[in-house]
Image (spheres, rainbow, N blue to C red):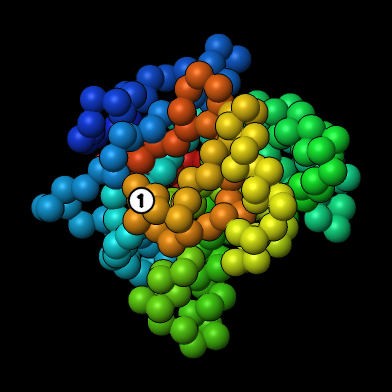
Amino acid sequence: MKHVTLTLMLAASASIISMAAASPEEQPVHIARAALPVKFDNVVETIMIDNQRYEVPEPWAGNRLFPTTRNLDELRPIPPEYAYDGSEIYILAEALEPFVEMAARAHQDGVELLAESAYRSVHYQARIFKKRMKEGYRYEDIVRYVAPPGYSQHMLGTAIDFYPSNWEFAESEQYRWLQEHAGEFGFEETFSRHNRYNISWESWHWNYVGKAEPGLTAGIGIDIEEEIERIE
Ligand SMILES: [Zn+2]
């Protein structure tokens, strides 16, 4: 088991909880949320892909995420009946039960919720960029629709993309059901039509934020390359 503790070097909002060292046994995964995206005029956020440094543009800038602990032992497979095509999809252990309860309740209501994707590592996100760049796309174009490594909630293991993860989902009975009930199970639509992150609407993307504790961390001052090295 490898534990990674990150230190918040800069915090713009009192609601950002400082990252204290905690073992997963004591405090499984404690994730805090910035009240507003953290942005500083004099700070340029960058990421590394294939040893090249790239600037992180809007709307991602200020929305970097990081978990307080990273422990892949805490990932669990979603039961195949709730996974699109029965595929192997993993989410954070503490989100599994709420997810299964939610999917079972939806099923009782005649609505079939199928996860298409959930946990995706920082590396996976970087590989998307590498692949597209090999195909000849420019970083500036890819980053318009793909979250840079370190900026996707999927790396936290809390986010689920439901099937179909495209614009059609907004028209579905699944989406209507989630809008009405997901909150009861601790899930929220992160990138709603008008979201505070200024990121385009993703009706299929729902994030487990828990019942008491809201869910995601935004911050800067984290060296994502260093984080990757420590996790590997
Ligand atoms: Zn998503």
Report if residue 9 is visible in the image. yes
Tell me what residue is drawn at x 53 percent, y 82 percent.
134
User: Residue at point 85% right, 58% down?
Assistant: 85
Q: Quadrant of residue 203?
A: bottom right
Seen in the image, is 37 located left or right of residue 81? left
SS for callout 1: loop
Depicted 166 relative to depicted 158: above or below: below
Read off the residue under disc 1.
Answer: 197
Q: Residue furthest bottom?
A: 136
Is 125 left, or right, of 32 in this rendering? Answer: right
Which quadrant: the C terminus?
Answer: top right
Q: Is residue 80 above or below residue 149?
A: above
Q: Quadrant of the N terminus?
A: top right
Q: Position of residue 145 (x, y in %)?
A: 46, 69
Q: Position of residue 71 (x, y in %)?
A: 60, 32
Asked whether 92 or 35 is in front, the reply is 35
Tell me which corner region of the image, top left, top right, bottom left or bottom right, holds residue 7. Answer: top left
> Eyeballing the image, is 55 above or below 72?
below
Q: Residue at x 29, y 26 (%)?
A: 15
Check disc 1 and give the amino acid type: Tyr
Any part of residue 159 in sight: no
